[in-house]
Amino acid sequence: MSEKGAAAYQTEPLNQPPYPAQSPPGYVPQLPQATAYPHPPAGAPNYAHPAPPPPYDANSNVIHGVQQPAVTTYVQVVTRPQVGPDPSAMMCPSCTKQVVTRLDYDSTTKTHIAAGLLCLFGCWPCFWIPYVVDSCKSANHYCPNCGAYIGTYHG
């Protein structure tokens, strides 16, 4: 740059003031009357918020001076009777008669495992024994009067 250019740069006045002009004290700017955004145009439907609900009163449902009768609730817990490997004397929960239970035996996983172990260890001719011995099966107890299922014993 030449000296003349640098001097001209420093000495020439700027067309803009360094800070915006300040308004005199007590000056209130006049805003234009806007009919558009943020205000809806004239004739537009008004989507106002609904009125808030009335305040909640915790005692509004209580009627003073009236005594409500006490309600007693009974809960009956029904459990299966404990049964064993033999017929049991008990009251049938279905027909409420005093009976001695009837037994039916069913093969279980335990029965099949016992037969498999007999075959595995070389006693394959005896694999049928767990299927005829009642202690290797589950005992299902039934009422002889009404035939209702009472319980199962897994031995």
Image: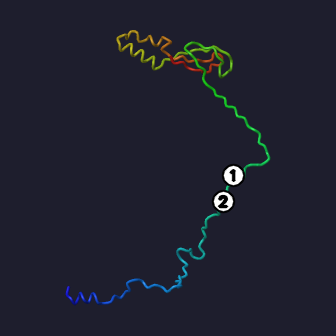
Residue at figure coordinates x 42%, y 18% from the top left: 113
Quadrant housing the N terminus: bottom left
Label 1 vs 2, first from the N-terminus: 2
Residue 39 in the figure: left or right of residue 10: right
What x and y, as percent, mark residue 31?
A: 53, 82
Query: What distance separates the C-alpha of mark 1 from that of mark 2?
Result: 15 Å
Place residue 117 in its image quadrant: top left
Mark count: 2
Mark nearest the camera among 1 and 2 is: 1
Residue at figure coordinates x 63%, y 63% from the top left: 50
Q: Are marks 1 and 2 in contact (CB under 8 Å)?
A: no
Query: Mark on residue 143?
Result: none
Residue assigned mark 1: 58
Q: What's under tag 2, amino acid-wise?
A: Pro
State the residue lying farthest toward the right.
65
Residue at figure coordinates x 42%, y 83% from the top left: 20
Q: Residues within 10 Å of mark 2 (few under 14, many from 20)?
A: few
What x and y, as percent, mark residue 13?
A: 32, 89
Q: What's under tag 1, amino acid-wise?
A: Ala
SS for tag 1?
loop
Residue at figure coordinates x 44%, y 10% from the top left: 129
Residue 118 in the figure: left or right of residue 154: left
What is the image's colouring? Answer: rainbow
Residue assigned mark 2: 53
Residue 124 lies, with reference to residue 30, above or below; the image says above
Q: Residues within 10 Å of mark 1 (few under 14, many from 20)?
A: few
What x and y, as percent, mark residue 29?
A: 52, 83
What x and y, as percent, mark residue 130?
A: 45, 13
State the residue lying farthest toward the front.
25
